[in-house]
Amino acid sequence: HVAGMFLPSPLSGWLVDRIGRLPVIAASGVTLLAAGLVAGFAPAESTPLLTLALGLLGLGWNLGLVSGTALITDAVPLETRATVQGRIDMAIAVTGATGGMASGFVVASSSYPALSFAGGIIALALVPLVVVRPRLKV
């Protein structure tokens, strides 16, 4: 999982530059959905399927982080870029910690598949945002 979060960064960066930020964000949403579906449908004793799901989770995170960071770099003036990026990094850390704690409550009150499916569906919400975003006047 952690390898999937960081090892693909050079390839992710190349994809962001080659095909664009928004298509890679959409790929992140689809990859995260795949992770949720694989994890949700995997039998609890299936180490290979759960390993695949965690690998996809790391890869989807990487695609989203690299493409999102590139969007921020494009959108923020150089003089405020470091401050904005630092605040975003802090928000990512706090959100990750909060999500990690909340996931325990979801699993305890429901199930691991429910958590997996919910996470995949939330991640899939990135795709319509990417499709609609270019048409918005921001």
Image: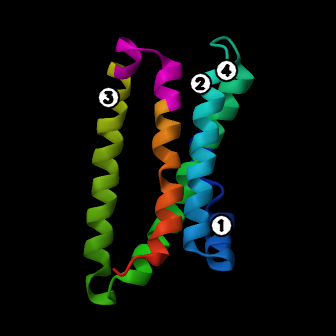
**Magenta stretch, residue numbers:** 106-117
| Quadrant position of residue 40 | top right
Task: Tell me the number on the disc at residue 40.
Answer: 2
- For the question of whether residue 59 can be seen, the reply is no
Q: Nearer the viewer, mark 2 or mark 3?
A: 2
In the rendered structure, which disc, 1 or 2, sits on the residue that comes first in sequence? Answer: 1
Up the image or down, 3 lies above or below 12; here it is above
Tell me the crowding category of disc 1: few under 14, some 14 to 19, or many 20 or more residues within 10 angstroms, Cα based: few
Task: Give how far across and how far down residue 115 sits, in percent.
Answer: 46, 26
What residue did someone put label 4 on?
42
Q: Nearer the viewer, mark 1 or mark 2?
A: 2
- C-alpha span from label 1 to label 3: 32 Å
Q: Which residue is mark 1?
A: 10
Q: CA distance from mark 2 to mark 4?
A: 6 Å
- Marking on residue 102: 3
Q: How crowded is the residue under tag 4: few (<14 C-alpha within 10 Å), some, or many (20+)?
A: some
Give the residue displayed 64% in from the left and 64% down from the top.
12
| Amino acid at the residue labelled 2 | Gly
Judged by its main secondary structure, the magenta piece is helix
In space, the residues marked 1 and 2 are separated at their CA atoms by 30 Å
Q: Nearer the viewer, mark 4 or mark 1?
A: 4
Give residue 134's position: percent from left, percent from top.
Answer: 48, 76
Residue at 34% in and 82% down: 76
In screen coordinates, is 18 left or right of 87? right
Q: Amino acid type of disc 1?
A: Pro
Q: Secondary structure at mark 1?
A: helix
